[in-house]
Structures are given as structure tokens and as C-alpha cells.
Image (spheres, helix red, strand yellow):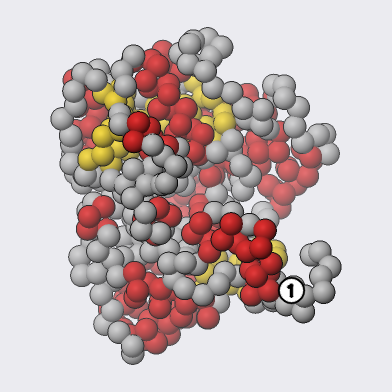
Amino acid sequence: MPDSDDEHALTNAGLFERAQRVIPGGVNSPVRAFRSVGGSPYFVARAEGAHVWDVEGKRYTDFVQSYGAIIAGHAHPVIVEAVREAAGAGTSYGAPTEREVLLAEAICERVPSCEMVRLVSSGTEATMTAIRLARGHTGRPTIVKFAGCYHGHGDALLAESGSGVATLGLPGSAGVPESAVAETLVVPYNVVPELGDDVAAVIVEPVAANMGLVPPAPGFLEGLRKACDDAGALLIFDEVITGFRVDRGGAQALLGVTPDLSCFGKVIGGGLPIGALGGRAGVMSSLAPLGPVYQAGTLSGNPLATAAGLAALSLLDDAAYRMLCGRAEMFAQWLTQVFEDASLPAQVPVFGSLLGLYFGDAPATDYASAKGTDEALYARFFHACLDRGVALAPGAYEVLFPGLAHSKDELERVSDLVAAAAREVAGTY
């Protein structure tokens, strides 16, 4: 930590005050500012396993887990050693490496719909590239997205997004001209739209995880697949959150629907910045240098991220997914009972290893119903948990990410803490 004459330099409040002088809002990603829940953020000093410690030394059981990028637990020794070894040989080359090939092979082996893969540096880059590729490959202009699905901060995809955009109550973003979204059609989630012959692609989170956790209705994804086939459009699955998190082959493997293109991130970086776009060879071959659709990135497939990604995937065998999903289901049942006992109206949906939290009388099925969650109640619950050392995302539209490091004993301990938090909140509800 840099030296400072500020007596609050090693406190959360002191660091936040300093940060606001040099960083817009004091944070480098908006939801971290705690605007929707109130108060000021904790600043992480270190992390290990299921826990993070702030600069004041307080320990939290962490369910943010870098918004899903961490699945094996913070500072997992296998991943740390892989990054350390890679860094010793150089951090970036601007030239191909063997690990790029190995990671692409690993993705293709796990996800049969991916015959070829292009590595990028973030989930946003993956979705932006998917949109450009779909338009270039089909020669069509229109993209269909679903309200409440967040696909990164690319101009064309910010309309009616979930995640931080929903948390801040923004319709999109200033600085995005109407022309940038003129060819983006936004439709309700869980409803199959009619597609015209101008549609290049439909992009969707197969399990919506940025407006809380909203699973696909029976027949929804199958209907999208048929609608795209009938219209000659491409179907894009944004699996930046669900990919390698809910199953070895992602949500598409569990749900049995095959997209033309898939976007990945988070887990395949092992905590480092990375993203990937994969799909049918006939479509992927439209990317430069084979085809006319240009995409590039100096740090794409960088040696540290590919080393971390390969190490993370090596830990995720079938037994690991059984354990992840089993613990998530168990934890969801415990939380549901906690809210029932406290007489708080709450839903705890679960899909694979993902948990949602919705404060309302009935589960959300689309963005309109997801926006019905009681954000004020979430804010009080968030702080009641944080005071007890349980860190949730500082926004009502994110999900919980229990991982391999969250043992059964730890989840049981947390359930008791959450029960106390729920009782406190219920007393003021």
C-alpha cells in the first residue's frame, strides 16, 4: 500500500475518499460504488479460498467471486503456480503461443458446438465480435436481444440490459447514439419472437443471470433455435457466466440446445482477463485472416490468462460439477428456509451452481417481473449480511457464485449468519 499522510489511508473509507479524487466515482466498474445499496465499498487486500479480507483486516465469506471468474476459490495454488511459471517466461509477446492452442482445444473438446475458437480479452469483446461476425457472415443488419440480458458494454447491446445497467436504473448509456442501436431489436425474455429476413442473429443468455437468475421457460430455447433456422439467422449463446460454471459443456449441454456461436469468459481465465468466441467452422472462418470480418487484440490469448485458464479447467471434472451443483442446491434450500422462518418474501432460484435472490412473492420470468424485486429490502439485507462477514454483490440483479472452496461446513455457518441478518431485516420490514 502506498505511503500517505492521510490517517485514513488504510481504512475502507479513507481509500474510497482517495479513489474518488482520481477515479470517476472511486471505482473502475460502476456497481462497485455501492450506489444502489448505500454506504461505501470495502477494499480487498487479499483473498484465499472462499474468503476475502478488506484493508481493515475484516474477513468476509465471498459470494461475489469476481462475478463468477473465480470457481476454484481465490488464490488456488494450482492456478497461482501456473501464472507464476508463465510470468517468469514473459507476460506478453504479441505472437502465438502453445497455450493458446491448448486452451482452444480444451474449449472445443468440452463444447461440441465449438469447432473453432477465437480468444479475446473479455466477455464484452467476445459478444462484440460475435455480433460483428454474425452481421458479416449473413450480410444482414439486425440483431435481436432480450430485455434484461446483459452482454457487456458494447454500444449495440446496452439497450435494456441487466446487471449494473439495471442496478443503476439506466435505460442504456449516454454517449450511445440512436444510430448505434437502430438495428438492435429488444424483445421480452422467454418469448420466442418472429424474425424477419433482415435478422443476422439472436443473442441470448441461455440462463439469464444478469436480472437475478431467470431460467428459460420450457420450449423457449428450442423455439429460438427453430426460429433462427427458419429465418436463416444465427443463434448466439452468451455463456460468459454459465460457460464452464454450470456444467463441463456449459448451459447448452444441460439444456440440449445447440447455438451457432457461443461467447465465454470468466472461468476460462482463472481470474485473469480473457474471453472467447466459438462456433461452427463455416461461420468462424469468416473472421480475419480467413475471412472479411476484422477482429484483433494485442493481448488476446496472452500467456498469463491462458495459463490460468488451463489450470482452472483442469480442476473441473465431472466430480467437481456434481459437488458444485449439489452444494448450490443444498444452500438454496437452506436460504429458502431462512427467509420463510423470517417471514420475508424471497425467492432463491438455482440453476447448476448459480443462485439467485429475488425479494418478492413469485419468481421472476422476464425483465419486467425481475424489476419487481424489492431493491430497498435487498439493500438492507445486503448490509445486514456484510456486517456479519458475508459478502454478496452490491446490486439486486446479480447472482451468488458458490464455488469449490465453499465447503458444506462453511455454507452451513453462513446460513446461520444469514438467518440472523434476515431476522434483523424482518424486524424493520
Front residue of 317 and 177: 177
Quarter occupied by the C terminus: bottom left
At x 40% / y 59%, what residue is drawn? 168
Above or below 382: residue 250 = above
Q: Position of residue 284 (x, y in %)?
A: 46, 18
Q: Position of residue 47 (x, y in %)?
A: 66, 63
At x 42% / y 21%, what residue is drawn? 133
Is residue 47 in view?
no
Q: Amino acid at mark 1?
A: Leu
At x 77% / y 36%, what residue is drawn? 91
Res 73 quadrant in image: bottom right
Residue extending farthest to the bottom is 427
Res 313 quadrant in image: top right
Q: Position of residue 124 (x, y in %)?
A: 49, 38
Residue matched to label 1: 10
Quarter occupied by the N terminus: bottom right
In the displayed structure, does residue 374 sit left or right of residue 1?
left
Mark 1: few, some, or many residues within 10 Å (few <14, many ≥20)? some
